[in-house]
Image (cartoon, grey):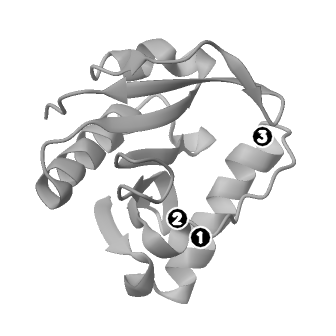
Amino acid sequence: MTWKVKSFNELSTHELYEILKVRTAVFVVEQECAYPEVDGKDLFSYHLYKEENGEVAAYARLLPAGVSYDEPSIGRVLVKESYRGRGFAGELMRRGLAFIQKEWGDQPVKIQAQEYLKEFYGSFGFKAITETYLDDGIPHIDMMLEKPFV
């Protein structure tokens, strides 16, 4: 039951394999969405994840400003299906926002959220800044957190 945050170069090959495996299981297989999961941004990101029973139970990619947006961002947020309902998603977001604030200062954070999670992200102070649009066939919305709180 360990939370870890590592840069790409700090990840072992085993850790990277487990992260890519769970991201593919959730975003490609579970959501039935064929898209380029390995997009080159991992190299410049930090990887926040929770290990349980030797596997990645929860994960988020923390991107510095300039990688996806002008602002820092949180992406690829997931909780593995067998670990859902335990509060990991909320803890993952709190830890991600705390890392961003500590490492990159008190600045706005931008995310691309699946539309059905608008209220979840809203509970952290994110506000919609776009209308709903389709990305790889899934309804999304861009959201911004003007002043991170932790």
Q: Nearer the viewer, residue 120 or 57?
A: 120
The picture places residue 111, in percent across and down from the top left corner, at 46, 36
Q: Nearer the viewer, residue 56 or 119?
A: 119
For residue 119, the mark is: none
Name the residue that disc number 2 marks.
55
Circle 3: element type: helix
* In the depicted structure, whether residue 136 falls above or below residue 139: below
The amino acid pointed to by label 2 is: Glu
Q: Secondary structure at mark 1?
A: helix
Q: Nearer the viewer, residue 123 or 136?
A: 136
Q: Are marks 3 and 1 in contact (CB under 8 Å)?
A: no
Q: Nearer the viewer, mark 2 or mark 1?
A: 1
* Circle 3: residue type: Glu
As measured in the structure, the alpha-carbon distance from the residue carrying label 3 to the one carrying label 2 is 17 Å
Identify which residue is drawn at 53% across, 68% down: 42
Which numbered tag is attached to residue 18?
1
Q: Earlier in the sequence, mark 3 or mark 2?
A: 3
Quote the CA–CA distance across marks 3 and 1.
16 Å
Residue 147 at x, y percent in the picture: 17, 29
